Image: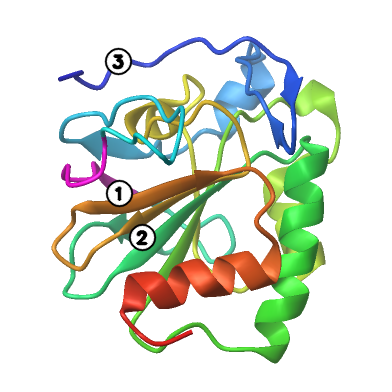
Amino acid sequence: MRWLIPALLVPMVIAGACRGGQSELSIEDADELVVESVVSGKALDRFESADSDTAVGQIAPLVTGLDLLTGETVQIKPAGRPFVVAFFAHWCPHCQREVASLTEWLMANKLPTNVDLIAISTFEAPDRGNHPPQKWLQDEGWKYPVIADTPSQTVADAFGAMSVPYFVFVEADGTVAFRMSGNLGPEQLSIAMKRLAGTSI
């Protein structure tokens, strides 16, 4: 079982998803990092396939960070309700399409009443465009909590992210129900959330 050790991911694009890469921070960037997200627990195995996902049934890591949109403290931990952790990168064209389509859908539809949604802004790279991520998400009208990953992608690594968009569906007791990668779109995400909530589709 892996402990939480940040990983360096090589930038590349795969079908329907973007691979993350670590970029160097300038002194100006470092000055803006007032509070860094904190992760505890054991890291999930890297996500490679939903068909044979070894993370299913494992306890998801705990995360505490500040909401990029409100400045309030957000925690990812069991709270008696299932939840979805969605990973996006501001420069990733697949993430840009996913956030745009999901935001439009979420404005017209509600999540299952007992399921929470938290986003992680990860693989931040100021030199790769569409930066900063909070402006992008505000401009899109995203209304759900967004935690910034650390410069070394600690949160993404803890949840086994290999590419983005990436989704981890977690049961109310904190165990991983299933994971999915790539562009889901509103219909597939709705089906997945209803499956997590235990409601009929």
Quadrant into which the N terminus falls: top left
Is residue 123 placed above or below 65 in the rendered structure?
above
Question: SS of the residue at dot 3?
Answer: loop
Q: Tag 1 or tag 3, which sits nearer the N-term?
A: 3
Q: CA distance from mark 2 to mark 3?
A: 22 Å
Report the predominant secondary structure element of the magenta stretch.
Answer: loop
| Residue 80 position within the rendered picture, expressed as x and y whole percent measured from the top left | 16, 75
What amino acid type is highlighted by mark number 2? Answer: Val
Q: Residue at x 25, y 44 (%)?
A: 56
Q: Residue at x 56, y 55 (%)?
A: 68
Q: Nearer the viewer, mark 3 or mark 1?
A: 3
The circle on residue 196 is none
In magenta segment, residue 20: no
The circle on residue 74 is 2
What amino acid type is highlighted by mark number 3? Answer: Ile
Q: Are marks 3 and 1 in contact (CB under 8 Å)?
A: no
Is residue 13 placed above or below 84 in the rendered structure?
above
Mark 3: few/some/many CA within 10 Å (<14, 14-19, 20+):
some
Boundaries of the magenta span: 55-64
Relative to 110, 152 lies left or right = left
Work out whether residue 43 or residue 51 is closer to the camera in this orientation and state it.
Answer: 51
Q: Tag 3 or tag 2, which sits nearer the N-term?
A: 3
| Residue 189 position within the rendered picture, expressed as x and y whole percent measured from the top left | 57, 66
For disc 1, the marked residue is: 64
The circle on residue 5 is 3
Question: SS of the residue at dot 1?
Answer: strand
Relative to 131, 11 lies left or right = left
| Residue 83 position within the rendered picture, expressed as x and y whole percent measured from the top left | 35, 66
Question: SS of the residue at dot 2?
Answer: strand
Q: Are marks 2 and 1 in contact (CB under 8 Å)?
A: yes
Q: Tag 1 or tag 2, which sits nearer the N-term?
A: 1
| Residue 53 position within the rendered picture, expressed as x and y whole percent measured from the top left | 33, 36
